[in-house]
Amino acid sequence: MKKIVIDGEGLIFGRICSFAAKNALEGNEVIIFNSGKVIITGSKKDIIYKYDRLKKKGGFSQKGPRISRASDKILKRTIRGMLPDFRRGQGKEAFKRIKCYQDLPKNMGNEKIISINMPKKLKFIELKELSDRI
C-alpha cells in the first residue's frame, strides 16, 4: 500500500476520478488536493445546466440525491460512482482510502506530488466555478 498525492490543478475531471478509483481499488491511499482547480471539459452552459438540474432534482423532500456544492465533495462523489459498490465489500474499503481537499493540507510537507500539465485549447469550466454557480 502506497500513498499517492495528486495536485488537481488543471487535471480533467473524469480522468482524475477514474485514476483515483482504480488506484484505491488496488489498495493505495489516494489524496487529491486543489480540487477546485480540476477542470470539466465542454460547454460551460451545458455543464452548469446538467449539475443545476441534478441539484434541483432532490427538491424539498427528505428523499432524493444530495448533491453538495463543495468542489471537493463533488469530486469525491464522482469517484464514488466509479467504484463497484461503495456500501459494502471492496468498494467500501476503497472509498475509505480516498481523500479530497480544497487546498494542500499542512501535514503534506515532504510527500511526492503527481502533477500533470493542463491540455491546450479546450472549452472547460473549473470545479470551483461550477460549485459557485449551482
Image (cartoon, rainbow, N blue to C red):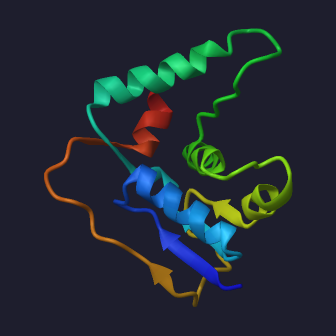
In percent of width and height, residue 39 lies at: 36, 49
Residue 38 in view of the camera? no
Give the residue at x 62% y 50%.
Answer: 76
Residue 58, placed above or below residue 81: above
Give the residue at x 46% y 60%.
Answer: 16
In the picture, measured across the screen, residue 43 lies left or right of residue 82, that is left
In percent of width and height, residue 12 lies at: 37, 54
Give the residue at x 30% y 31%.
Answer: 44
Q: Residue 29 or 22: which is nearer the viewer?
A: 22
Residue 97 in view of the camera? yes
In the picture, measured across the screen, residue 85 lies left or right of residue 4, that is right
Give the residue at x 66% y 68%.
Answer: 24
The quadrant of the rendering that contains the N terminus is: bottom right
Residue 11, placed above or below residue 124: below
Kindly indicate the quadrant of the structure image that contains residue 8: bottom left
Q: Residue 97 or 69: which is nearer the viewer?
A: 97
Farthest residue toward the top?
60
Farthest residue toward the bottom?
110
In percent of width and height, residue 22 lies at: 58, 65
In the picture, measured across the screen, residue 17 lies left or right of residue 3, that is left
Q: Residue 28 or 55: which is nearer the viewer?
A: 28
Give the mark count: 0
In percent of width and height, residue 123 lies at: 21, 41
Residue 128, placed above or below residue 38: above
Farthest residue toward the right?
88
